[in-house]
Amino acid sequence: MKIKFDYIDSDAQLIAFSREIVSAKWLAIDTEFMRERTYYAQLALIQIASENTHALIDVPALSSLEPLRDAFTRTDCLKIMHSASQDMEVLGQSLGVTPTPLFDTQIAASFMGEADQIAYATIVKQRTGIELDKDQTRTNWLQRPLSPAQLGYAEADVLYLYELYEQLLAELKTAGRLEWVQDESQSLAEKMRLASEPELAWQRLKSLSRMTPSQQHTARDVASWRERRAQQRDLPREWILKKQAVIGIARTQPESMQQLGEIEGLTEKVIQRIGKQLLSVVARERGDTCKTLVPPELKTEQRSQARKVMARLREIGEAQHIAPSLMANRSVIERLVAGERDLPLLKGWRAQIAGNELLGML
């Protein structure tokens, strides 16, 4: 399928293009970006296809992406993307809005028996017979000019999205699952809006279940501090403070520079640079804190229950042709076994398909 894509590298072209798509019924969207030495992704290219218009938008060449805001937020224009989470995050950072309403073809495919997190090239080959060239996956998207191979790769990433959407839409309607996919796609948009909130950074940490409530709160505060500093300096969070150091600080709750020096992952250079700030953060949460952020590790009997519940979840997923991870992961199952009830698994379509039955097992 050879379709001409306009290459947009001036503000005037972007304004004209935005006027063309303002009445579009759907937009297929993808992005290319780099994020190796920065906190915020460096958006390099936006690919957009609609009924009548196709374009590659050279982001570094433009002074603003503002003309796209109206089309991206129009509620009567469906936005079709595949594995949209990172693209939504990057667009939210660069444009201040995320494309809505959203239909994520990866999410839709997982409701119709496809493998969890199926790749775009894989589903395109399965459903259209077309094999995409993925040689440019690790290419430098900030170099200019972009090569013909890079441009062809970028075009293909949106060229088949509408065809996939039409196929999946028909299947979802037949199965009575379209509303589920719509809910999950919109939920993803909300998650991406909150993805960079410093107050939620602790949720990326593991091992909190093996900590006391006080240690958990220290981990939360240190993770939030690290996230803010990474944002302010536009550096990867691991460059600010290693994750193992965040865990080590939370566990030991140091009171001196000397104690900081005993924590794995904290070099003398790092301590000299930010040690006093870390001690100040730790001091706010040292001592007893009543409310836990994460339930404690399961006991032996509970772990046995969790294994049985996970096994049943996999059986339900196979019978319903739904990826089990879409319903719940191991962490959610462990929280269920531990007694937590305010879980997505016990709400909406998840409760109907699996949650109520799994709760009954307990």
Image (tube, grey):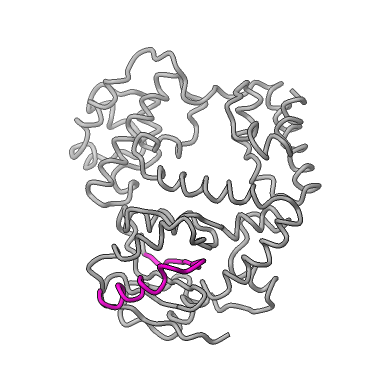
Total marks shown come to 0
Q: Quadrant of residue 91?
A: bottom left
* Point 40% across, 38% down: residue: 244
Front in this rendered view, residue 268 or 92: 92
With respect to residue 290, does 13 lie above or below? Answer: below
* Point 64% across, 39% down: residue: 328
Q: Quadrant of residue 354?
A: top right
Front in this rendered view, residue 102 or 200: 102
Image position, residue 2 (x, y; %): 54, 87
Front in this rendered view, residue 22 or 197: 22
Q: Quadrant of residue 149?
A: bottom left
Q: Tell me if residue 28 is in the magenta stretch.
A: yes
Q: Which residues are magenta?
A: 11-33
Q: Quadrant of the C terminus?
A: top right
Image position, residue 279 (x, y; %): 24, 26
Image position, residue 110 (x, y; %): 67, 54
With respect to residue 1, does 316 lie above or below? Answer: above
Q: Quadrant of the N terminus?
A: bottom right
Q: Is residue 180 left or right of residue 190?
A: right
